[in-house]
Amino acid sequence: MHLVIPQEDFTLDMKEPLEEATTLYLWGSKTARREFCKTCGILPWYRPRSNPDGYGITYMCIDLEAKGDAKPEVEIREFDGENWEECFKTSEIKHQSKKAKSRYI
């Protein structure tokens, strides 16, 4: 599950430079930018094709509790990646990288 947020809400707390910790993977339109962890291979965040002005974050990688904050409330919605173009047109995902009160996974 991924949470899409506006670019201005995204911050990283990393000890090493991004280029040393991750491997960039681009495909298709090269709009989506995937940064995979070189150590464990997970995709903690990415720049989605659907929202190039925001970030998709793997929900289980959010560590707000360490700062005393609660995880955000989210509404889980399915997205049909096999029929990406059609699903994108009928979904509200493109609005998730804009400032709003709620976010969707």
Image (tube, helix red, strand yellow):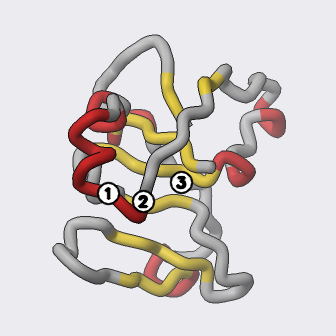
Q: Is 39 on the left-hand or right-hand side of 25?
A: right
- Badge 2 vs badge 3, beta-carbon distance below 8 Å: no
Label 2 CA crowd tier, 10 Å (few <14, some 14–19, many 20+) = few
Name the image quarter holding the C terminus.
Answer: top right
Q: CA distance from mark 2 to mark 3?
A: 27 Å
Q: Is 29 on the left-hand or right-hand side of 97?
A: left
Q: Which mark is residue 12?
A: 3
Query: On the image, numbered disc 2 is attached to which residue?
Result: 81
Give SS at disc 3: loop
Of 49 and 78, the residue lying toward us: 78
Query: On the image, numbered disc 1 is attached to which residue?
Result: 84
Q: CA distance from mark 2 to mark 1?
A: 5 Å
Look at label 3 and name its amino acid. Leu
| Dot in front, 2 or 3 | 2
Look at label 1 and name its amino acid. Trp
Q: Which mark is residue 33?
A: none
Look at label 2 and name its amino acid. Gly
Give SS at disc 2: helix
Whole-percent x, y for residue 63 in the image? 74, 44
